[in-house]
Image: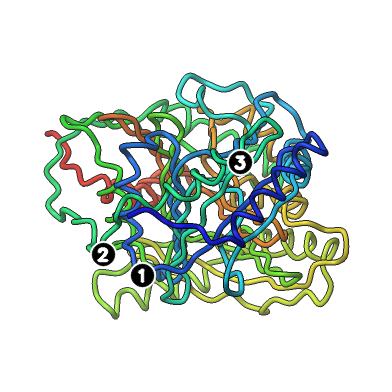
Amino acid sequence: MITTLDHTIKEYIQHALEEAKQTNQSVIVSHIKEVDAIDPLHFFALGEEIYLGERFFWSTPTADFTMVGLGNELVLENEIHTSDRFQKIEKEWKRFNKKVIADHKKQVGTGPLLFGGFSFDPIKEKDELWDAFSEAKFVLPTNMLTVFKNKTYITINKLITPMDHLDTCIKHFEQVGEKEFTLFPYQIDCEKGNEFASIELKTTEWVEAVQRATADIRASEIDKVVLAREVHLEFTERIDPYQVVGRLQKEQPTSFIFEFENGLQHFVGATPERLIKKEENQVLSTCLAGSIKRGKTKNEDKLLGNQLLHDDKNLIEHDIVVKMIKDAFEHCCFEVSAPEAPALLKTKNIQHLYTPVKGFAKKGHTLLSMVERLHPTPALGGFPKEKAIEKIRELEPMHRGWYAAPVGWIDHEDNGEFVVAIRSGLIEGNRAALFAGCGIVEESDPESEYFETKMKLKPMLSALGGVENE
């Protein structure tokens, strides 16, 4: 099917091209159209033929909002070790003039927007695993599917440069609709028969790091530090990224699902933790710290939840996170509010202590400036913030890359949402690297913390669909 553009859209494109030539500055043109329902995962999979290595997938809890990007129309990235990577991405994004063509009110997650993420710590030297990932990378998709409130939209983006020709630009918008995306779900294979062998890297060193951290906390050097470890898996067959995303959606409905394709590597996960959401000037963050397993029966699950709600170690850990996020909000927001006591947030394998924090952004405080202020929260770094990051560099026997860092999206009106990329893994071919961490406080026991990381690895292990070799 070929899309025929009307005269008005062609005029928009022509004006954008004239502006680009006059100012010698590229212009982003976005055409939004409502379409019949399309299955997002099927759209993602069909993009492989043309856009392999340049795709993303994002869905919120209960999948009431989903975005899929195909193609990198524009890439903004920061490859050097620098502390101003948030400002640089924001400055570059603001540099482009953006024109939106739509025959209806623009909906959330449509039009020109960036999707991507940051590394956890740009100062720590990268290892080979994360070598292809920049310290910050964001993409403007060429084509994007958005499903919001049961309606489906396609956004076609074009970066119009001073060197472009009108016919070429018009053809870009016309040809996007040639491929039919019919409505049928991508078939998820529930059978898990891909055998794998696992290697736990530097487990002894990690246990020793926990012991050293608790000693430092008892010596009042620091209040809390989060230490993560990694597990590498090698499967007998290639890992199907569509099956992984599909299983995560099915098995982790209360989590954010993300998939960022970087060449042949897929950074994918199901995180329950929102870092920040901004819609106009309304801002929301989620404090998630303190965990316990789910029960095998309804009664056991309730008992475990009550145990978590009254556990001193976990309550202390949670209170540290709430205090830090509220303090950050007080700096950049007004009317900051949060419940006095945490509730429970239950995922398939784990239940967490949960406290939402809300506010309204003060003038001059942008989404990315707030992401920078919040990252990393004590749930992923520790407290005090800078000392915790230094302690992680000193003790943690791995490089986090994009694990536990902000991943999300931002549009041209400074709306967007970022999550903390936990419960995640890096997939390439038949190999996967998975990551999990825990908050270390004075009362932490290395053996208990080790088993907590094993519990946190379960969502991704299940989504990979493997059966461990004996």
Please rate how many residues cluster around mark 3, counting C-alpha atoms within 10 Å: few if below 14, some from 14 to 19, many from 20.
Answer: some
Chain-order first, disc 3 or disc 2: 3
- Label 1 secondary element: loop
Q: Earlier in the sequence, mark 3 or mark 1?
A: 1
Give, as a three-letter code, the residue at label 3.
Leu
**Residue marked by disc 3:** 166
Residue 209 percent coordinates (x, y): 54, 32
Query: Which residue occupies 67% across, 43% down?
Result: 217
- Residue 385 shows in this picture: no
Spot occupied by residue 282 in the image (x, y as percentages of width and height): 72, 72
Eyeballing the image, is 174 above or below 283? above
Disc 1 marks which amino acid?
A: Asp
The amino acid marked with disc number 2 is Leu
Residue in view at x 47 percent, y 19 percent: 128
Circle 3 sits in a helix, a strand or a loop, which is it? helix
Q: Which residue is mark 2?
A: 183
| Residue 388 seen in the current view | yes
At which x and y percent is residue 249? Answer: 33, 60
Q: Which residue is mark 1?
A: 36
Q: Nearer the viewer, residue 447 or 90?
A: 90
Which quarter of the rendered picture does the C terminus lie within?
A: top left
x 46%, y 60%: residue:
154
Q: Please name which of the two marks, 3 or 1, marks the residue nearer to the observer.
A: 3
Q: Residue at x 35, y 50 (%)?
A: 178
Q: Is residue 134 above or below residue 101?
A: above
